[in-house]
Amino acid sequence: MNLASLVSDSARRAGGNLAVVGPDHSVTYSELDRAADTLAHLLRDSGVQRTERVVIWLDKSVTAVAVMQAVLRLAAVYVPVDGSGPSRRTAQIARGCSAMVIVTDSRRAAELRESGGELPELLVLDGLPVADGRDPLPLEPVGPEDLAYILYTSGSTGEPKGVCIRQRNALAFIEWAAAEVGATSRDRFANHAPFGFDLSVLDLYVAFRAGASVHLIPSEMAYAPQQLCEFLLAERITIWYSVPSVLILMIRDGGLCEGTRPPWLRVLLFAGEPFAVDYLAALYRHLEGVRFLNLYGPTETNVCTFHEVTASDIAGGEAVPIGRACSGDEVWATTPDGRRAGAGEEGELVVDGPTVMAGYWGRGAHRGPYRTGDIVRVRADGGFEYRGRLDHMVKVRGHRVELGEIEACLGRHPAVGEAAVLVDGTGMAARIVAVVVPVGPPPGLLALKRHCAERLPRYMIPDSVLTVDELPRTRNGKTDRQALRDNLLQPSGR
């Protein structure tokens, strides 16, 4: 089995089953299979061969999904780029991975040509192409070590980093996830994440493996809470996967916890960031009988641990654990002195196993375990609690401070829905600034200071509090700390 065979296998088993429901139109497995064949011919005509990279810069659509499948059938490598991103970044990525072709639409093609610089060939699609009568191309043989796709993430140097994912990396996760959620052809998956974000791998490929349908949420609806709640009901979604921020929006502004529970929903998965405890508890109680799975893993490993939320987790009032290893991986925590952390100890989470990436494009192969940069605490049961990021470790007036620990503490205050913490200034002038989204009347600085003083050392107590209606988000739905800093810590914004 490989990623290219999942759709064709489902087409042979039940070609009339609905495969993809998009904002443009819907296709059955047989129709998706034929569209992928037609597109594979067009790509081959453009010179795409085994291992060549194909950048896909399109709206989230059935057409984009079919292009991914076409690339895989040629044993080539697809590189999805956010359809709403700038043309210069798309061109930068295409040049960076030496792409043979950029697949895009007429409007974006014009933007690319105007952006300047050398470009690969453009294959312009304004919808699914009409079949030209040619026989399907035979599937190219693919091995487990062959690359399937490259996902670009932000790099600390300002240059995007291409995370290279092999067939075996993706399949190890897909096989585990399909078994864990018990996916069948009757399921209806929602796809909230952009195709360039690793959450979409579950939505698409677990659905394809089971012969289920995947329902694409248009990018313009991604942060429209009332429309998302309506989508969940109207599309009769059975499996939902998104970052917690989206679910919090749906609870707070979309009425997700009001009225009748979505009758078809059976599994709700979330990943990418901690889920504010009060919101999670409210949703868990409202969606009685639905399985809640907290998935964890950076793009470089996809999902490597998971935890199924229980009533005792909710009753405890603490952030839910990220759980134990999955997808065939081995996971452990390493202390600063290089030991494996034991129960009750903290350390950096390290992952080894089949989901660990091949490496970053152009930077050589990755060898050995992957150090995540995430700090965890080892639980007595062998699972892990997320504590924060190594790169969110700062020094405030001589003390080492983990901003994630302050955020977790603030999130346990009943008047705080979400929180982000920034440091303003340097040296002895450094100040800890808490940015909170309130639940009901905004909490005062003194109330939050008292709350933190009961749980944190004095040097970690926020110096000031700013209240906002919502935290800014990156395209992947995570808190955009740079936008917070730019908007709130400038002299005019204080």
Image: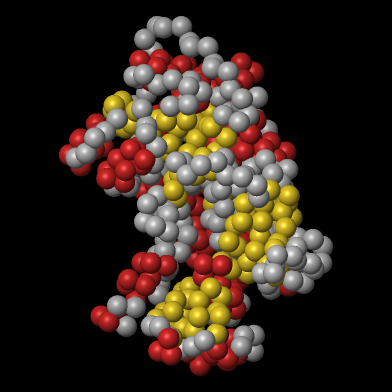
Q: Position of residue 44 (x, y in %)?
A: 39, 17
Quadrant of the frame with the C terminus: bottom left
How is colour applied across the structure in the image?
Answer: secondary structure
Q: Position of residue 265 (x, y in %)?
A: 63, 47
Q: Nearer the viewer, residue 40 or 76?
A: 76
Q: Residue at x 57, y 44 (%)?
A: 366
Q: Up-down: is 466 above or below 323?
A: below
Quadrant of the rendered structure where residue 63 is?
A: top left
Q: Nearer the viewer, residue 267 or 67?
A: 67
Total tally of numbered discs in the picture: 0
Q: Residue at x 66, y 69 (%)?
A: 336
Q: Residue furthest right?
A: 381
Quadrant of the rendered structure where residue 264 is?
A: top right
Q: Up-down: is 166 above or below 37?
A: below
Q: Nearer the viewer, residue 205 or 311?
A: 205
Quadrant of the frame with the N terminus: top right
Question: Does residue 76 appear anywhere in the picture?
Answer: yes
* Residue 345 shown left or right of residue 355 in the figure: right
Q: Residue at x 40, y 89 (%)?
A: 429
Question: Does residue 237 appear anywhere in the picture?
Answer: no
* Residue 84 shown left or right of residue 313 in the figure: left
Q: Up-down: is 130 above or below 332?
A: above
Q: Position of residue 444 (x, y in %)?
A: 47, 89
Q: Residue at x 38, y 83 (%)?
A: 425
Q: Position of residue 100 (x, y in %)?
A: 36, 27
